[in-house]
Amino acid sequence: MNYINFFRKVIVLLLLLPLFAVAQTNYQQAEEYFKQENFSKAKPVFEKYLKQHPGDKKTREYLGDIAGYQKDWDTAISYYKSLVNEEESNANYHFKYGGALGFKALSVSRIRAVSYIGDIKHHLERAAALDPKHIETRWALVEFYIQLPVIVGGSEKKAIAYANELGTISKVDEYLAKGYIAEYSGRPKDAEKYYKKAIEVGGSPHTYEKLAGLYEKNNQPKEALETTSKSLKIHKRNQLNYQIGKISAQYNLEPEYGIECLSEYLANYSIKDGVPKDWAYYRLAQIYKNLGKKQIALTWINKALIDRKDFKEAQQEKSLILAL
């Protein structure tokens, strides 16, 4: 045995181990950035890793997902297509590829979009066939078939069939999907029935949000306010305070309650609540305008305009307040 060569290999291996550890640490950090949706930091690490490991599927999937988040559909399609070609039996690859094609179709002209329909349908249906418990795929197919014009393959019957399949996985999703189909097809009473069933079965903030949104779209602000108030009592989510204030302001409904909820929203605000503070100031100004309290309304609308002078809605609202 050549001991000199053996020891050389051992020494080289020992020298390389820290490099492998650093690479692994960097990759894991990139995955953490990805989970946090900090894609500007995750992307270069993944790209560098892919240059060294061009066949790595997980890295290509990460980069495809990042491209999708950034609405770079061509890049996303390229990554997902290669993954589907290499692993035809992977439901998630088909779902992501079909979804990226769908968003690409929405970004081009209607004439060009038609050319994507066959591939979208094929890959989404393939994903559904490969994984009978893939909820996202069935939701995508519900939306695909209900939104697609009948002349190019749209079908409410097929959308309902996939909503029924959702029911074998999650009754809440079934009722939400059927509510969505009814709402999209102009049957608000049916949609209301299904959204209420979703609340009975699941009761998540999303189920209440869907019902409240339906009421708002159909000019039923009182019902929307009642639904959102019930959700607030159960879920204690600060964002719901803003939603109540918004409904109160838009429809001149229960102004004192609206002021109370918006004040609570501002007192407990965090960036996770989603709606910036200036919108809460704007809604307070609307409520005080509705009450005829011009000076208080001006105070709030000016507050909304301090940080964002190009706040067009607030500028328009200020004109209305000044005209009181």
Image: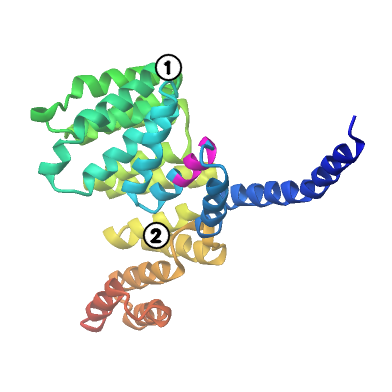
Question: In which quarter of the view is residue 323 placed?
Answer: bottom left
The residue beneath circle 1 is 132
* Residue at 69%, 46% in the rendered image: 24
- Judge depth for marks 2 and 1 and give the one in front: 1
Could one spot residue 315 in this view of the protein?
A: yes
Q: Relative to 261, does residue 68 appear above or below in the rendering?
A: above
Give yes or no for contact between labels 2 and 1 (Cβ–Cβ under 8 Å). no
Q: Is residue 221 left or right of residue 28?
A: left
The residue beneath circle 2 is 245
If the image is split into quadrants, where does the C terminus sit?
A: bottom left
Q: Point out the residue furthest to the left here.
A: 151
* Residue at 28%, 28% in the rendered image: 142
Q: Is residue 318 left or right of residue 264?
A: left
Counting labels gives 2
Q: Point out the residue furthest to the front here.
A: 2
Mark 1: give few (<14), some (14-19) or many (20+) Cα within 10 Å. Answer: some
In this view of the protein, which residue sits in the foreground, 275 or 65? 65
Percent x, y of residue 302: 38, 82
Question: In which quarter of the view is residue 178 placed?
Answer: top left
Q: Amino acid at mark 2?
A: Gly
What span is in magenta? 57-63
Could one spot residue 191 in this view of the protein?
A: no
Q: Amino acid at mark 1?
A: Pro
Q: Is residue 60 magenta?
A: yes
Mark 2: give few (<14), some (14-19) or many (20+) Cα within 10 Å. Answer: many
Numbered label attached to residue 6: none
Q: Is residue 26 left or right of residue 34?
A: right
Percent x, y of residue 201: 46, 25
* Residue at 32%, 78% in the rendered image: 310
